Image (tube, rainbow, N blue to C red):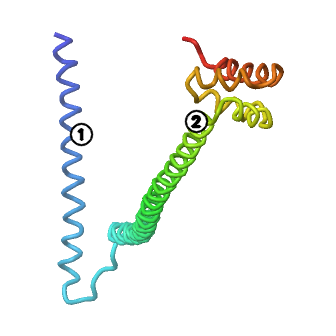
């Protein structure tokens, strides 16, 4: 039974707190209504502190909105500048690719022309009498002579080498034999 009374006492205290809270809320509204009714026709009551808070908040939000607008404009300007720079870089890259392609074509043409000249000169040396070609090859540097002899068919190269002195033929043979020594074998 004592438990039941303890529960009723706690319930009574909670009910009293609710009632007093409601009375305070009603009382605060009634005081303002009475003051307004008495002051009708008189000057308006000065605004209380709760009215100033929203205007300060509004002012702060306005300032923040202005700062954000300035930042947005700055970002738009930067994005526009980046877009222009990107377009300029893209255009420059395309120009560079075109120049590179043109240079490659020119180099290929020059390489082709040089290769054709070497082939023609090799054919001339090959068509010469081996004795005359051997005399000419002896006056060339061994590296230069090896380049031509390496392009000739073996029988023509052998005929020219047999007409050269032993020392010159050996020097050219060593260069021709060692030319591909550094090539990977795997």
Q: Which residue is mark 2?
A: 127
Q: Compare residues 155 and 16 and report the one nearer the observer.
A: 155
- The vertical placement of 144 against 172, above or below, is below
- Confirm whether residue 108 shows in the render: yes
Image quadrant in which you'd find residue 144: top right
- The vertical placement of 166 against 86, above or below, is above
Q: Categorize mark 2 by other alpha carbons within 10 Å: few (<14), some (14-19), many (20+).
A: few
Say whether disc 1 or disc 2 marks the residue closer to the N-terminus.
1
Q: Compare residues 13 and 54 and report the one nearer the observer.
A: 54
Q: Position of residue 134 (x, y in %)?
A: 73, 30
- Looking at the image, how many numbered discs can be counted on the residues? 2
Q: Which residue is mark 1?
A: 17
Q: Compare residues 131 and 97 and report the one nearer the observer.
A: 131
How far apart in space, not on screen, are marks 1 and 2 (Cα)? 126 Å
- Confirm whether residue 67 shows in the render: no
Secondary element type, mark 2: helix
Q: Quadrant of the N terminus?
A: top left
Q: Residue at x 20, y 51 (%)?
A: 23
- The vertical placement of 144 against 27, above or below, is above
Q: Residue at x 22, y 33 (%)?
A: 14
Image-based side of 114 in relation to 4, left or right: right
Image quadrant in which you'd find residue 42: bottom left
């Amino acid at each position: 039974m004592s438990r039941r009374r303890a529960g009723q006492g706690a319930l009574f205290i909670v009910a009293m707190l609710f009632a007093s809270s409601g009375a305070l809320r009603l009382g605060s509204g009634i005081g303002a209504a009475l003051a307004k009714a008495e002051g009708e026709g008189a000057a308006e009551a000065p605004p209380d502190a709760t009215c100033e808070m929203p205007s300060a908040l509004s002012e702060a939000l306005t300032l923040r909105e202005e700062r954000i607008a300035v930042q947005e404009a700055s970002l738009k300007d930067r994005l526009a500048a980046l877009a222009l720079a990107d377009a300029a870089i893209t255009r420059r890259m395309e120009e560079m690719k075109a120049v590179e392609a043109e240079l490659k074509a020119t180099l290929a043409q020059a390489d082709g022309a040089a290769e054709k000249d070497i082939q023609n000169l090799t054919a001339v040396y090959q068509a010469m009498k081996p004795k005359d070609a051997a005399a000419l090859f002896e006056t060339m540097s061994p590296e230069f002579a090896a380049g031509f002899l390496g392009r000739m068919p073996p029988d023509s190269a052998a005929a020219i080498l047999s007409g050269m002195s032993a020392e010159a033929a050996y020097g050219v043979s060593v260069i021709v034999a060692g030319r591909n020594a550094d090539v990977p074998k795997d």
